Structures are given as C-alpha cells and as structure tokens.
Image (tube, helix red, strand yellow):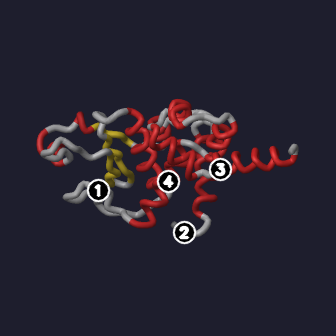
Amino acid sequence: MRRGFKTEAKHLALELRSEIGLSAYVPFDPYAFAVKYGIRVIHLSDLHGPARDYFFRSDGSALSGALIPYGTGVIILENDAQPLTRRRTTMCHELAHVVLEHTFGVSLSDERKCGLGGEQESEADWLSGEILIPADGAFRLAWANATDEQAADTYQVSKAVARWRMNQSGARKIVQRTCAKRAKQYI
C-alpha cells in the first residue's frame, strides 16, 4: 500500500459517507451509494443458464461479488445467497475499486478470485474497512468498551470485520494506553 494511503482513506471514507448523509457513527448503506452513483447491482440469483453456472463451483462455493466493466461504467455482480453482512462487505470492497478509479480488465479467472491483485486489492480492502467502520466510529466504540459483537451489531457487519477494524484502527490499544496513563497520574 502506498505511503499515506491509510490517512487518505480515513478522510475519503468520511467524505463518501457524508455524500449519502451519513456520519461516522451509523452503518453505511452500500446500496444507497450505488444508486446515487448509477452503479447497477445484479444478483447471482437473477442470472440463468451458463452465465449463472460460471460463478458457482461444483463443490457449492460461489463468487461473493465482482466488478464488471459495462459500457463506460461498471456493474457489481453480487451473490445474494450470502448473509447480508458478507454482502455489505463485498459491496464496499467493489465500490472502493470504483471510487479509487482502479483500472482493470475483466478480472474473472478460473479460480474466481479478484484479478486486480497487489496494491489495488490492499487499497480496496482498507478503504472498504474505513467505509464500513470509520476510525472515528472505532474510537467511539473503544471508549465505550464495546465488544466485537457490539461493534458488529452497531455497524451491521460480521464479527470478523468488526474485530479486524477495531484492531487495525488501533482504537482499543490507544484507549487502553490513555486510560493506563490517566490511572498512573492518580496513583
């Protein structure tokens, strides 16, 4: 990830949230964002025949989502059979690619993994995390001593995403250190 990107992503995520009227302290609605910016979302369940079969493996696993070039824009293909928390995370990841103006060709491979790779994937992962649980929100949760489950419920994400954001934001460690310093002052 390029130097300074994490700081840039913090500011960008708050800006993106404000564009659809959201603060850092409420769940992000990736579907409202897609509508506002004219990004069509197609569900796997809406596909039929070979087009749908391509995205499902014989072992029952399936693609979570994909960003597909369409004319001068893009379409997000979403696996609507997955839990909503997973779908929201996938949507934010794909939207992050769009917002960051990542260049790509058709990225669907036989392994059905995102084909952008490297730095673009790291950036999309980080920005999507900031969009889902902004650093400001993570700090508020840390000051409230929120559990991963409470963070997940607050932001409508999976427990794994909540844990990742609470840890990667540094919010809990900073709050713990601040409390420890304050406690030492009164001893």
Question: Which residue occupies 29% across, 56% down?
Answer: 113
Quadrant containing the C terminus is: top right
Residue 64 is situated, as x and y percent measured from the top left of the image, at: 31, 45
Nearer to us of marks 2 and 4 is 2
The residue tagged 3 is 173
Amino acid on which the number 3 mark rests in the picture: Lys
Left or right: residue 182 versus residue 42 is right
Question: Which residue occupies 79% across, 50% down?
Answer: 181
Nearer to us of marks 3 and 1 is 3
Q: Are marks 2 and 4 in contact (CB under 8 Å)?
A: no
The Cα–Cα distance between marks 4 and 1, rounded to whole angstroms, is 20 Å
Nearer to us of marks 2 and 3 is 3
Residue 120 is situated, as x and y percent measured from the top left of the image, at: 44, 63
The residue tagged 1 is 113
Residue 63 is situated, as x and y percent measured from the top left of the image, at: 27, 46
Question: Which residue occupies 75% across, 44% down?
Answer: 179
The residue tagged 4 is 99
Q: Secondary structure at mark 1?
A: loop
Amino acid on which the number 1 mark rests in the picture: Lys
Q: Secondary structure at mark 3?
A: helix
Q: Nearest the camera: 45 or 140?
A: 140
Amino acid on which the number 2 mark rests in the picture: Arg
The residue tagged 2 is 2
The Cα–Cα distance between marks 2 and 3, rounded to whole angstroms, is 24 Å
Q: Are marks 2 and 3 in contact (CB under 8 Å)?
A: no
Amino acid on which the number 4 mark rests in the picture: Val
Going from the N terminus, do you reach mark 3 or mark 1 first? Answer: 1
Nearer to us of marks 4 and 1 is 1
